[in-house]
Image: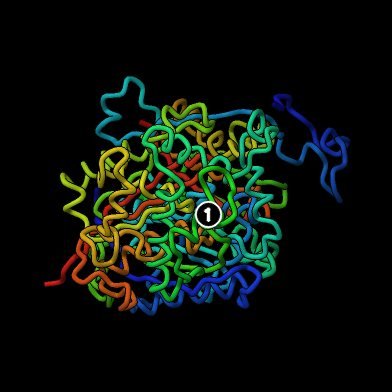
Amino acid sequence: VRREAVTAADVQASAPVNGPLRELMLPAGCTGAVAVVLGSLARARRALNPRAVLLGWGQSTGDTTSGGQWLRDPAAPARRAAAEAYRRAGIAEAADQVEAVELTAATPALLAPTLDALGLAKSRAVVDPSGGALSAYPGVANGALRLLEAVCWLEKHGGRAVAHSHDTLTGCVADTATVLVLEAV
Amino acid sequence: MANRAVIAGVGITAATSPRKQTSSAGELVAEAVWAALEHAGAAPSSLDGIVIGNIDGFEGTVLGAKHLVRRLGLGAELPVTIVNTGGTTGGNLVQVAARQVRSGDRRRVLCIGGPTFFGAQDLQAAINTNSPMIVEQPLGMGAYHMGAFYPSAYAERFGATVEDFAVSAVRDHEHASRNPYAHLRNTLTVEDVVAAKPLSYPMTMAMVCPVSTSANALLISAESGAGDLRPTPVLIRAMATSADPYLGGGKNDFAAMENLAILAHKVYQLADVRDPRAEFDVVEVFSPYAPMQPMQLEALGFAPPGGGIELIRSGATRIDGELPVNLSGGPLCTNAGVAGELAPYVYVALQLMGDAPEQMQVPGARRGLAHGTGGTFFQFENLAVLERQERS
């Protein structure tokens, strides 16, 4: 939805939303739908154009809102989801083994904690090569869009990528997190 | 399929109306969860997942479930899967949990059925908004009018009368009177049911379920990880779901439950059931409107088309009959939302474990069938074949 490069001044000049937040700091809400076809590896070998291998998946939900964890440690669900996904994917050191990440940071304040939770804070992984949720955020289809963008990146560059999303409908913005680990075919 | 999934623990609370309920939703759920863990002999630390759900429109979308599970004393980190499939949520909790275990994603998962209708001021008003907006709502049609589509079509084809449908209500109440967890435990005669307030022909008030509050929980475990648990494990041998179109016009026939028949065919094939009438020892079907039960029994292959009422009248579905059905009293006597839809699985598991309350236990029950359904026209069905796994 947002395709133009912007400067810090453009961001400051965009519409104020709440407190220090400006419109261009927030996800670009839009409509959109994504469909994904999943198959076993055996079936996928017979597919005409298999696009990526899903190596690992993880999902986690935070504590109650009244517990306060969502403020103190907003990426705790993302950290647990990542640990589960990396375990299933057999990834011991994400920082060395993941080349790109498509993540969902509902505000700029969540970017650093989320990257850290995914184990990618000190890595050379490309962050949000598509522009991430700031370029297009189709509501409940966001998770599938992050997956699609990660797959597209893998098709060009190869290697491994991570797609991260969270559910903004059922609690505080980072309360339910999903992490997928993908590998180029 | 990597693993087999078993039911390895059951927890259930007594039921009553929202008005008379003295426990909060949190207290009811906690009671059911800890009862299931105690029944199983499982340590909370051995869990690696929770599956819980809500019914949209009756309670906050997933917030209740999400916040309830963090107040159970099971910690704040267990992965939670939230199921939100309307009326069928309770049955689908089992479908989701069992698939998680079968795939190897999880080893031991708690399925939690909460008391959905807790505190609903006017459940009837909420449920009436479920009917499709274009035609049905402007006609003044509410939930039970739509429930009456089936029996009126059935009456038209097979000549069934109000007195015939009443037999099903009488039988469920007779069973509920032996179930200490049931909400309505009074017995009724055919005359009582026929004389009750007429709602939508051919249904009377006594053929429609109450609004109940209760909670229940099931522990679903990998078969290989259930060796240390106390109850005789109950294998989830086969299960599936099936859906019809949303609008009533998408139904081919209201005098037969065709969607359920298609689902039964599939599930029986998976479980290698060839003669259902002979092969099941205990059955729980979801029939919140009494006339649904004979039609469901037909769709499930227990009676020929038009023969469901005769099957019930013959006594075959009583506790001492050859095919005991709804020994819990079914949703006609206790219907607590998500907990109500999970209940058929809960009761069949208890029967197969041999752990049902003595006065409602079928001696030696080995194989059972649990069914759930939901939707304005009951378009969505879920079904499972459960089997007792003797320990050597």
Q: How many marks?
A: 1
Residue at the spot x=55%, y=67% of the render? B69
Measured from the top left, where is residue A81 in percent x and y?
49, 55
Measured from the top left, where is residue B14 in percent x and y?
49, 74
Measured from the top left, where is residue B28 in percent x and y?
55, 73
Using the image as rendered, state which of residue A27 and residue B174 is in the foreground. Answer: B174
Quarter-of-image position of residue B230: bottom left
| Residue type, label 1 | Val
Using the image as rendered, state which of residue B362 and residue A108 is in the foreground. Answer: B362
Residue at the spot x=38%, y=78% of the render? B43
Question: Which residue was labeled with disc 1?
Answer: B208
Outermost residue on the left side: it is B392
Give the quarter of the figure containing the N terminus of chain A: top right
Label 1 element class: loop
Height in image: B95 above or below B224?
A: above
Give the quarter of the figure containing the C terminus of chain A: top left
Height in image: A23 above or below A79?
A: above
Measured from the top left, where is residue B97 in percent x and y?
39, 56
**Left or right of residue B60: residue A162:** left
**Which class describes the residues within 10 Å of circle 1: few (<14), some (14-19), or many (20+)?**
many
Res A81 seen here? no
Outermost residue on the top side: it is A48
**Left or right of residue B223: residue A79:** right
Using the image as rendered, state which of residue A80 and residue B294 is in the foreground. Answer: B294
Marked residue chain, label 1: B
Quarter-of-image position of residue A69: bottom right
Res A32 seen here? yes
Height in image: B138 above or below B26?
A: above
Residue at the spot x=37%, y=52% of the render? B371
